[in-house]
Image (cartoon, helix red, strand yellow):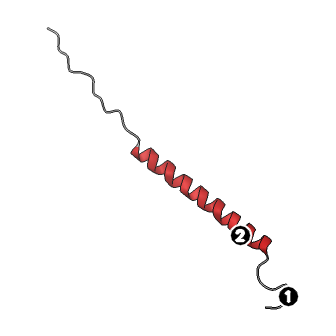
């Protein structure tokens, strides 16, 4: 490689930062979707009390 060829440290850092940002957004979306689907649902039915 000649002088000035390849990736500079600044470009690598910027690329990693962008990739990490995308991964964070993706994982946050997955976590929200899973927590929304796994949220406990309140399926308690009213007590069947029959009074004469």
Query: Split into 4 quadrants, where in the image is the C terminus?
Result: top left
Query: Split into 4 quadrants, where in the image is the N terminus?
Result: bottom right
User: Which of these two is toward me, 10 or 36?
Assistant: 10
Judged left or right of residue 14, residue 26 is left
Residue 22, position as x, y percentages in the image: 63, 61
Q: What residue would you read off at disc 1?
A: 3
User: Which of these two is toward me, 3 or 52?
Assistant: 3
Q: Which mark is residue 13?
A: none
**Against 39, is 13 above or below?**
below
Q: Earlier in the sequence, mark 2 or mark 1?
A: 1
Q: What residue would you read off at disc 2?
A: 15
Residue 28, position as x, y percentages in the image: 56, 52
Q: Residues within 10 Å of mark 1 (few under 14, many from 20)?
A: few
Please, what secondary structure does the residue beneath circle 2 have? helix
At x 31%, y 33%, the residue is 43
Q: Residues within 10 Å of mark 2 (few under 14, many from 20)?
A: few
């Amino acid at each position: 490689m000649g002088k000035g060829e390849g990736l500079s440290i600044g470009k690598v850092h910027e690329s990693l930062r962008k990739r990490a940002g995308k991964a964070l957004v993706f994982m946050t979306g997955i976590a929200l979707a899973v927590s929304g689907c796994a949220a406990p649902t309140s399926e308690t039915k009213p007590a069947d009390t029959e009074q004469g």
